[in-house]
Image (cartoon, rainbow, N blue to C red):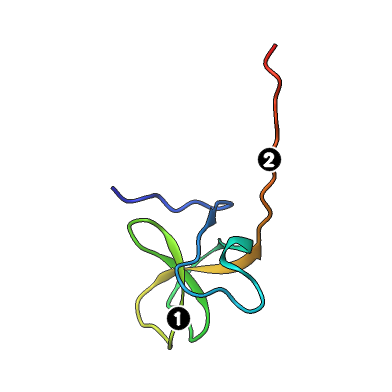
C-alpha cells in the first residue's frame, strides 16, 4: 500500500544527509512543487515516501523537497 504525499509532513531521507548532519537530525519537507528535479535537488518518491537527492537533471516530474532540521520532543500527559 502506498502512502499519500502531504504538505507539512516530514519524510525520512533515503540518501545520505548533507554534512555535518546525521540522518536522525534531518527530514524532508515537500515544498508543494512538482517538476523534474535538477542535479543536487532533493525530491520525494517511492511507495513508502522518502527523500532522494537527484544525481543529475531528471526528466520525470517529482515532488520537490527541502531538507529541514528536526528535533524530537517527548511530552508526557498524566491520566486522571
Vertical side of 41 occupied by 28: above or below: above
Q: Earlier in the sequence, mark 1 or mark 2?
A: 1
Nearest the viewer among 48 and 23 is 23
For the point 56% across and 73% down, the residue is 17
Residue sticking out furthest to the left:
1
Q: Which labelled disc corresponds to residue 14?
A: none
Q: Are marks 1 and 2 in contact (CB under 8 Å)?
A: no
Q: Secondary structure at mark 2?
A: loop
Q: Which labelled disc corresponds to residue 74?
A: 2
Tell me where residue 15 appears, x and y as whole percent.
47, 73
Q: Secondary structure at mark 1?
A: loop
Q: Which labelled disc corresponds to residue 54?
A: 1
Nearest the viewer among 74 and 6 is 74
Nearest the viewer among 21 and 51 is 21
Name the quadrant containing residue 57. bottom left
Vertical side of 36 occupied by 80: above or below: above
Tell me where residue 62 appears, x and y as whole percent.
41, 70
Dot 2, crowdedness within 10 Å: few (<14), some or many (≥20)?
Answer: few
For the point 36% across and 82% down, the residue is 59
Quick check: 62 left or right of 7? left
Name the quadrant containing residue 76. top right
Quick check: 49 left or right of 26? left
Dot 1, crowdedness within 10 Å: few (<14), some or many (≥20)?
Answer: some
Name the quadrant containing residue 70. bottom right
Placement of the C terminus among the 4 image quadrants: top right
Tell me where residue 71 appears, x and y as whole percent.
69, 54
Quick check: 61 left or right of 76? left
Amino acid at each position: 500500500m502506498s502512502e499519500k504525499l502531504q504538505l507539512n509532513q516530514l519524510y525520512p531521507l533515503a540518501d545520505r544527509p548533507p554534512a555535518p548532519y546525521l540522518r536522525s537530525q534531518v527530514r524532508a519537507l515537500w515544498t508543494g512543487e512538482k517538476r523534474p528535479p535538477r542535479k543536487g535537488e532533493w525530491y520525494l518518491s517511492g511507495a513508502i515516501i522518502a527523500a532522494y537527492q537527484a544525481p543529475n537533471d531528471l526528466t520525470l516530474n517529482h515532488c520537490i523537497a527541502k531538507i529541514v532540521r528536526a528535533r524530537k520532543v517527548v511530552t508526557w500527559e498524566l491520566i486522571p
